[in-house]
Image (cartoon, rainbow, N blue to C red):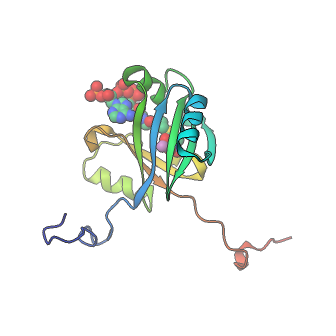
Amino acid sequence: MSAGGGTGHGDGDPGLPQGLLLGIDHVGIAVADLDAAVEQYRAALGAPPVHRERVGSQGVEEVLFRVGDSYLQLLGALGPETPVGRFLDKRGEGVHHVGYRVASVAAALERLRAQGVPLIDEAPRPGSRGTTIAFVHPKGFRGVLVELVQEPPRAPAPEDPGARPTA
Ligand code: KFV
Ligand code: CO
């Protein structure tokens, strides 16, 4: 909380009135058996998952459940020598990372680098759902692996002249 006792909004960087993090995009949970975990969550939550995707570059298959404006991300490992595979081996199932929305992953990385926060990804990379992501080392956030998430640009509205088909 700010020294003035306010909400904390508006007292950060002049260039970042809300601070770096705009919201929670997802909480990533490592699971040993993705299909079994999906069924367990579906039954408990009473709602089906909204997305499933294999992200080979990260060695995971993910399934998303909606939680308000955010997601719960179940993560199955594509092999033992992957980040989630090693995590399951060493720690077992549980919360693996928190994905925070940022306006720009590139700008967020620049700021964190300048602050001396240890980065895993030096540059933005593709995530699931067309997002742009980057991981920050858990050493920089008190043992929590942090993922920066930038949402894909929205499709232009149909009335947008730039969106009209050319043919
Ligand atoms: N949370 C907190 N600490 C962790 C951790 C985690 N998830 N994983 C590992 N650690 C700690 C571990 O306890 C150890 O601490 C150190 O990090 C190195 O662990 O105090 P210690 O003992 O030194 P290693 O060597 O066992 O783990 P390794 O896997 O080799 O490296 C850890 C790390 C965080 C650098 C690696 O997992 C990584 O590069 N992660 C980023 C990529 C990733 O996690 N991808 C999977 C999610 S993909 C995703 O969410 C997507 C695609 N999406 O769109 O949302
Ligand atoms: Co994630």
Q: Position of residue 155 (x, y in %)?
A: 65, 66
Residue 57: image quadrant is top right
Q: Left or right of 72: which side holds 120?
A: left
Q: Position of residue 23 (x, y in %)?
A: 40, 59
In front here: 81 or 38?
38
In front here: 101 or 120?
101
Q: Is residue 60 above or below residue 48?
A: above
Quadrant of the rendering where the C terminus is positioned: bottom right
Query: Does the image show residue 12?
Result: yes
Residue 14: image quadrant is bottom left
Q: Position of residue 63 (x, y in %)?
A: 58, 40
Q: Is residue 87 above or below residue 163?
A: above
Q: Left or right of 99: which side holds 77?
A: right
Q: Is residue 160 above or below residue 3?
A: below
Residue 16: image quadrant is bottom left
Q: Position of residue 21 (x, y in %)?
A: 36, 59
Q: Left or right of 123: which side holds 47?
A: right
Quadrant of the rendering where the N terminus is positioned: bottom left
Query: Does the image show residue 101?
Result: no
At horizontal 35% and vertical 43% (from top left) the residue drawn is 119
